[in-house]
């Protein structure tokens, strides 16, 4: 998903939708594109945000790879707190990092990228593999199974007792 985008197909399956982002400009872009009363936009840092309700489903797009490894368990617990007991989780992400971005070496989780105006910035970008996600999330009770392939994108879903992640 591109920044500032709420996929309209979500609304065809939902009575309401909550979109959370720390960046007010991304929320403004999304709100201008969606213009639907069923979408609630919340500006918050996910590491300090507390849900005010439990959700039927949680989806996160291109976010998991930006969760620092030391906060991975914390984020997983947040997802669990957000869900109703039988609620599934779905996500899409990638492990894409160019050699030029790897300013601290191949195994670093910090990369350098540039905005379209050329301004450089550093970001967390963890190159998860399906087997690593299977182990990490399985240890947290997700019961995850991650089939592997050689492609870049990760798709995943977790149901209360079973989940899968695969590379496209």
Image: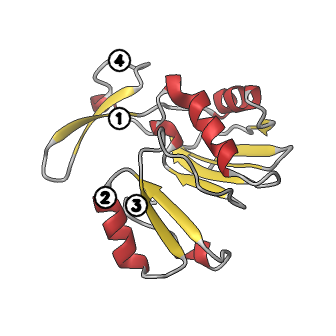
Q: Seen from this angle, which residue lies furthest front?
A: 52
Mark 1 vs 3, N-terminal side: 3
In the rendered image, residue 57, in percent from the top left (x then y), is placed at 69, 59
Mark 2 vs 4, N-terminal side: 2
**C-alpha distance separating marks 1 and 2:** 28 Å
| Dot in front, 2 or 4 | 2
Give the residue at mark 2: 24
Position of residue 22 relative to residue 143, above or below, is below
Q: Quadrant of residue 134?
A: top right
At numbered mark 4, what does the secondary structure look like: helix, strand or loop? loop
- Of 95 and 21, nearer the camera is 21
**C-alpha distance separating marks 3 and 2:** 15 Å
Give the residue at mark 3: 2
Give the residue at mark 1: 98
In the rendered image, residue 99, in percent from the top left (x then y), is placed at 33, 29
Residue 123 in view (yes/no) = yes
**C-alpha distance separating marks 3 and 4:** 27 Å
In the rendered image, residue 53, in percent from the top left (x then y), is placed at 64, 57
Give the residue at mark 4: 105
């Amino acid at each position: 998903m591109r920044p500032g985008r709420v996929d309209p197909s979500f609304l065809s399956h939902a009575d309401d939708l909550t979109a959370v982002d720390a960046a007010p400009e991304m929320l403004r872009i999304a709100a201008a594109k969606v213009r639907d009363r069923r979408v609630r936009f919340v500006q918050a840092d996910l590491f300090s945000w507390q849900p005010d309700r439990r959700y039927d489903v949680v989806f996160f797009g291109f976010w998991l790879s930006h969760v620092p490894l030391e906060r991975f368990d914390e984020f997983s617990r947040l997802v669990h707190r957000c869900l109703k007991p039988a609620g599934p989780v779905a996500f899409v992400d990638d492990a894409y990092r160019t050699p030029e971005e790897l300013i601290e070496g191949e195994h670093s989780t910090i990369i350098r990228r540039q905005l379209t105006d050329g301004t450089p910035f550093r970001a967390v970008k963890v190159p998860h593999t399906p087997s690593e996600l299977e182990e990490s999330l399985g240890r947290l009770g997700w019961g995850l199974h991650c089939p592997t392939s050689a492609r870049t994108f990760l798709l995943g879903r977790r149901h209360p007792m079973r989940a899968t992640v695969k590379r496209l």
